Image (spheres, helix red, strand yellow):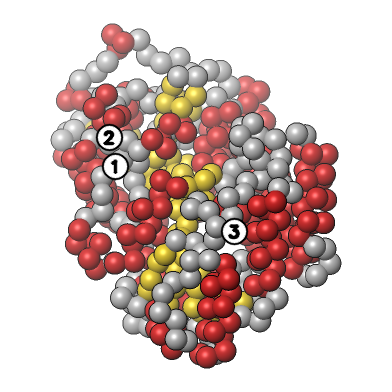
Amino acid sequence: MLKQCLAMLATLTATATIFAAPPVGAAVSSSELKGTLTIADWELLENGHGPQIKALFMEYEKTHPGVRLKFEGVSYDSYVPTIEAQIGAHSGPDLMVLEDSSFYDLLRAHVLAPITGLPAADLNALRPQNNQAMSDGHRYGLIWETVIYDSIYNKSLFNKAGITTAPKTFSEFLSDCKAIKAKTGAWGYAARNTINEEDAWYDDFTATWIDGYGGNWTDATGKFTINSPQNIAAVSDFAKVYRSGCMDTGEIAAVFRAKYEHGQVGILMDNADAAFTYTYDNPVVTNQDQGVASLPMPAKYSGDQQLFFTINKYSKNAALANDFLAWLYDPATQQKVVAATAPQTSGSTTPLPPDFVKTHPWVEPYEHQVDNGESLLVQKRPWLTLKLASILMPYIERVLQGQLTAKEALDQAQSAAVSQLGN
């Protein structure tokens, strides 16, 4: 998740007023709508899906001759600060894609407009997770993509190490990790494990080890449960792998992901978009060489992150924005969305195209896992997530370095979180 501009959000919260939806009588026919609709999304700049997304969106213009679409592509690293600065000036795009952390920040600041354009039939076709974007009986977001984690592995390295199936338990995982390193020379496993990637490490570790062990940093009320038995077990077992000699340690994601693409890592735990990138035009690890399976951990869960389509409260084209979303989430359009953005999981129940599944057989476990996702955000208080990460991850680093046991570290992290963030 991106660093948030906390000062900007404080200003937004202090100055914003609650959006008032237009009266029912103000509805406008789609054919009568005119104007320029600005859409912001960092994905528009990406080589993979960017051109396909733009081409799909432009189909809206063909049936709306009075409408022109304008795209605002901002790099991922600059996206949130740019959007927040624009909204702080009561301007910005009409429609914007937001990660769940940014979505809840802006929702809390009352700068998102309710989404009112979808008919009941289309709402019924949405996945239940869309209700995460409901507040006070109003819908403020629609899921554009769900990022879900699973275990990714190199079948060729498995074969060379004499491994016939993906590991299902931690003991099998650790054994396979050691076998890959001993018999092939490649790293058995790689994952983020350094403070210089603190936020992303928090995301990955929570999504795989904590959720995979049935743990959570908070309970349903938002009360911190950092030192729960499940969390202690997860941190302890991660440390065992870290010190086993089969894990590639001390490397940032850009380095170990490149190693995986070159056949030098056996197992990663990552999302479907990453899995797609690893095999894209890659003669070393192809779609047939790559396997995906459930995490080799006690619980069925893994972490997810939602990307929401939202409407800017300060948009002067709210009716047009609602009409665009009604078009985008119509079942017929959703079939095109899913085809254009595969292997992403969309906000509807529309399945991936059979041809894509055939050529990317590793994708099916992701489709099954999407209903077992757990949010990476602090429950009830999502705006505290980044602060929690900055408190928590240094304690986990001390476990890896052998300075503290998992229980000692998480007991201390629990006290620090309650002291600094409240409980």
Q: Does label 2 or label 1 sit earlier along the sequence?
A: 2
Q: Where's residue 62, x and y in %?
A: 16, 39
Q: Residue at x 77, y 34 (%)?
A: 422
Q: Where's residue 266, x and y in %?
A: 49, 78
Q: Where's residue 72, x and y in %?
A: 40, 45
> Residue 125 bears which disc, if any?
2
Q: Are marks 2 and 1 in contact (CB under 8 Å)?
A: yes
Q: Would you call the spot at circle 2 few (<14 residues within 10 Å), some (14-19), or many (20 or more)?
A: some
Label 3 amino acid?
Trp
| Residue for badge 3 | 209
Look at the picture and state if 1 lies above or below 154.
above
Q: Residue at x 45, y 47 (%)?
A: 372
Numbered disc total: 3
Along the line of sight, which residue is nearer the eye, 88 or 225?
225
The answer to whether 336 appears left or right of 45 in the picture is: left
Q: Residue at x 26, y 31 (%)?
A: 122
> Residue 349 bears which disc, if any?
1
